[in-house]
Image: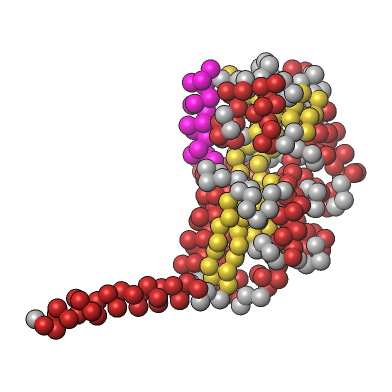
Amino acid sequence: MEEILYFEKFLKPFCALALIIGLSFSVSAADYNLRMTMNSNDQDEDYDGSIVFKNYVESASNGAVSVELFVGTQLCSKGAECLQGVSDGSIDIYISTSGGAAGVFPYVQVLDLPYLMSDDRIAEDVMQSDFVRTVRKMALADSNDSIRLMTIGNTGGWRNFANTKRQIAEPSDMKGLKIRTVVADLPQVLVKALGASPTPIPWPELFTSFQTGVVEGSKNGITDIMNMKFPDAGLQYVTLDGHAYMGALWWMNNAKYQSMPKELKKVITDGFYALQQATFASPKRKSIKAYEDFVAGGGNLYVPSPDQKAMFKEAASPVYDWFKSNVKGGPEVFNALTSAVSDAEARMADAYGKDLN
């Protein structure tokens, strides 16, 4: 009995302290620590993917790799700044949109070319194809082997035209509308091709810009529209043209990746696969409630007919030649994407032929 009391009074607290110290040591003893940042928030698909990545990598590496998440602008605030951080090693992993990386790697704007991918099955196939390896090779060459593209996921579903003024059923309805774009060239060229007026506005200023009429429309997914409460600023019309897949490019410091043994490289690669799958799924689920809330709040959804969608694609077609002629690496990456799309479409056609019998 005395031995039990002695243990309870003296040894048990000591053992608990030793356990805590041991756990702390095991965490701090990770061979590799990855600083992962995203300029978004914990409601975003990027965050969903990063949580999956962190959990997978730390578990599968048996603690050899730890992952620190930095959400928002703690480490950097803009694409070029963040990619410079990846290059110099102060940031290990960063997620960008195509527009966010276009100032450093202009050819990633290929993901913004309109109406090249028809649906999620095609897009998700393409994002797991040699197209990604082509972009990786190009980015490594242009960054002196310092910035490595690990995967391309999704952030927000598909881009659709939305505005405060009227229903858009065909390209002529776009005429004269002031459409918010990022500062990258391609989105501005696209908006002009459709007869509207591109107006570059920083994302944090967009709500107020809708309210004041500085801009009258945007090119965004429904989850972004609802998360930012844009309907409260007057955005009431959404046309589900799905003109571009909202790709999320996940970049990693190549020196950090190459410093790992092969078995840990596999863990990291598999972690990015798990992340990618999470970002594929997340916007599908989140968009259900987002569309419901948009309509419940008086929003107008319009689905173009096949003929109308063909009209949009025809009106936007000059953008393809502009991209190949004006963007460094444009022809190579355009051919890589369109080839991957053709291969994906062939695989889907074959699958439907087998599954629809």
Q: Is residue 354 above or below residue 307?
A: below
Magenta stretch in the rendered image: 283-298
Quick one: which residue is furthest to the right in this view?
325
In this view of the protein, can residue 296 be seen by the observer? yes
At which x and y percent is residue 248?
65, 48
* Res 184 → quadrant: top right
Horizontally, is 173 left or right of 266 in the view?
right
Identify the residue at image location x=90%, y=44%: 326
In this view of the protein, can residue 125 be seen by the observer? no
Identify the residue at image location x=74%, y=17%: 173
Q: Nearer the viewer, residue 15 or 138?
A: 15
Residue 164 is a magenta residue: no
Quick one: which residue is furthest to the left in this view?
1
Identify the residue at image location x=81%, y=34%: 188
At which x and y percent is residue 52?
50, 56
Q: Nearer the viewer, residue 53 or 76?
A: 76
Q: Is most of the magenta stretch helix, strand or loop?
A: helix
Q: Nearer the viewer, residue 233 or 100?
A: 233
Q: Is residue 70 above or below residue 88?
A: above
Tell me how the rendering is colored: secondary structure
Q: Number of marks in the image?
A: 0
Image quadrant where one finds the N terminus? bottom left
Residue 294 is a magenta residue: yes
Identify the residue at image location x=75%, y=27%: 179
At which x and y percent is residue 183?
79, 39
Quick one: which residue is furthest to the bottom in this view?
3
At which x and y percent is residue 236?
61, 20
